[in-house]
Image (cartoon, grey):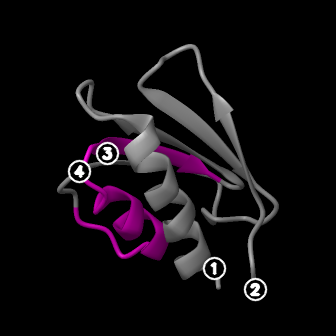
């Protein structure tokens, strides 16, 4: 099932918040992962595989994606959108 995403800027220029129209992280607790952490969550795997992404934080229907300071959003955002498309196709 396709997913709808809404990307929002945050006060931190190295982080963006992505709201979705579906639950992407089940359960009452949050998910916080850094690049290189082990996980079985398909979206987390796809996001953390993108060069320049440092960590993610997600709960229920949103995820905050943080990049390294030297990475550029212009390069990363298309890959983030593609990760959502591929995981939730």
Front-most of residues 75 and 30:
75
The correct choice, above or below, for 87 with respect to 22 in the image is below
Q: How far apart are marks 4 and 2 (CA)?
A: 27 Å
From the viewer's perspective, is 56 left or right of 59? left
Q: Do the residues labelled 1 and 3 touch (CB within 8 Å)?
A: no
Specify the label residue 53 is tagged with.
3
Q: Identify the element where label 2 is drawn.
A: loop
Q: Identify the element where label 4 is drawn.
A: loop
Q: Identify the element where label 1 is drawn.
A: loop
The stretch in magenta equals: 38-59
Please identify, in this view, whether the residue under mark 4 or under mark 3 is nearer the observer: 3
Residue under label 1, please give it.
88
The correct choice, above or below, for 18 with respect to 27 in the image is above
Q: How far apart are marks 4 and 1 (CA)?
A: 21 Å
Q: Look at the image and tell me whether residue 31 can be seen.
A: no
The residue depicted at 54 percent of the width and 80 percent of the height is 86
Name the N-terminal-most of marks 4 and 1.
4
Q: Look at the image and tell me whether residue 22 can be seen.
A: yes
């Amino acid at each position: 099932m396709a997913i709808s995403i809404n990307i929002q800027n945050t006060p931190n220029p190295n982080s963006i918040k992505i709201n979705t129209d579906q639950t992407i992280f089940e359960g009452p607790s949050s998910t916080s992962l850094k690049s290189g952490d082990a996980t079985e969550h398909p979206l987390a795997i796809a996001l953390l595989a993108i060069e320049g992404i440092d960590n993610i934080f997600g709960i229920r229907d949103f995820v905050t994606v943080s990049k390294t300071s030297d990475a550029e959003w212009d390069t990363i955002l298309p890959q983030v959108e593609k990760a959502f498309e591929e995981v939730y196709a």
